[in-house]
């Protein structure tokens, strides 16, 4: 599942991952992501940090509180590169952190690493 309020970024992530054989569910923010989980089996979350309604840190905390997503990889995609923000992501339960802008190859490398 890719979660980002930027349609262009969601499209890029979806295109890159679908091209590599992954199935993608798109959500516009954390609330939308949670509502789309019902009946879905999700093996990986890629989420922006800064979004309206529910940001990526809160989404990560809520996913980690659910038994079925406690150990599912969560990659945060963000323009934030400060160590303090990364620490907040780690404390929330994020598996990895990718700073925007990133290349398709960088994205795929991280996805493959956390999906082992």
Image (cartoon, helix red, strand yellow):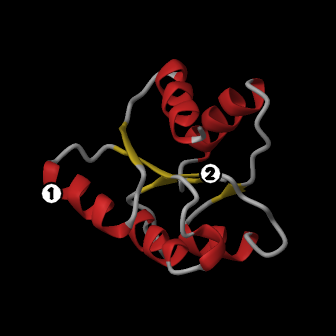
**Residue under label 1:** 84
Does the CB distance between marks 1 and 2 fall below 8 Å? no
Of residues 46 and 95, the one nearer the viewer is 95
x and y percentages locating residue 115 in the rendered image:
60, 41
**Count of marks overlaid on the render:** 2
x and y percentages locating residue 33 in the rendered image:
64, 67
x and y percentages locating residue 41 in the rendered image:
78, 61
Mark pair 1, 2: CA separation: 24 Å
Mark carried by residue 44 = 2
How many residues crowd around disc 1 within 10 Å: few (fewer than 14), some, or many (20 or more)? few
x and y percentages locating residue 35 in the rendered image:
71, 76
Residue drawn at x 25%, y 64% as measured from the top left: 88
**Mark closest to the chain's N terminus, 1 or 2:** 2
Residue drawn at x 15%, y 49% as measured from the top left: 83
How many residues crowd around disc 2 within 10 Å: few (fewer than 14), some, or many (20 or more)? some
Considering the image in quadrants, where does the C terminus appear?
top right
In the structure shown, which secondary structural element does the residue marked by tag 1 occupy?
helix
Residue drawn at x 51%, y 30% as measured from the top left: 107
In the structure shown, which secondary structural element does the residue marked by tag 2 occupy?
loop
Residue 22 vs 55, above or below: the answer is above
Q: Is residue 81 left or right of residue 39?
A: left
Which label lies toward us, 1 or 2?
A: 2
Residue 112 vs 97, above or below: the answer is above
Residue 71 vs 53, above or below: the answer is above
């Amino acid at each position: 599942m890719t979660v980002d309020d930027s349609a262009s970024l969601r499209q890029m992530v979806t295109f890159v991952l679908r091209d590599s054989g992954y199935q993608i569910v798109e959500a516009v923010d954390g609330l939308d992501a949670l509502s789309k989980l019902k009946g879905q089996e999700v093996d990986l979350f890629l989420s922006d940090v800064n979004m309206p309604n529910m940001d990526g840190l809160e989404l990560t905390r809520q996913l980690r509180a659910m038994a079925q997503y406690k150990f599912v990889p969560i990659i945060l995609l963000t323009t934030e590169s400060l160590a303090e923000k990364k620490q907040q992501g780690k404390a929330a339960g994020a598996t990895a952190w990718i700073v925007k802008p990133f290349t398709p190859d960088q994205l795929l490398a991280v996805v493959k690493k956390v999906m082992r």
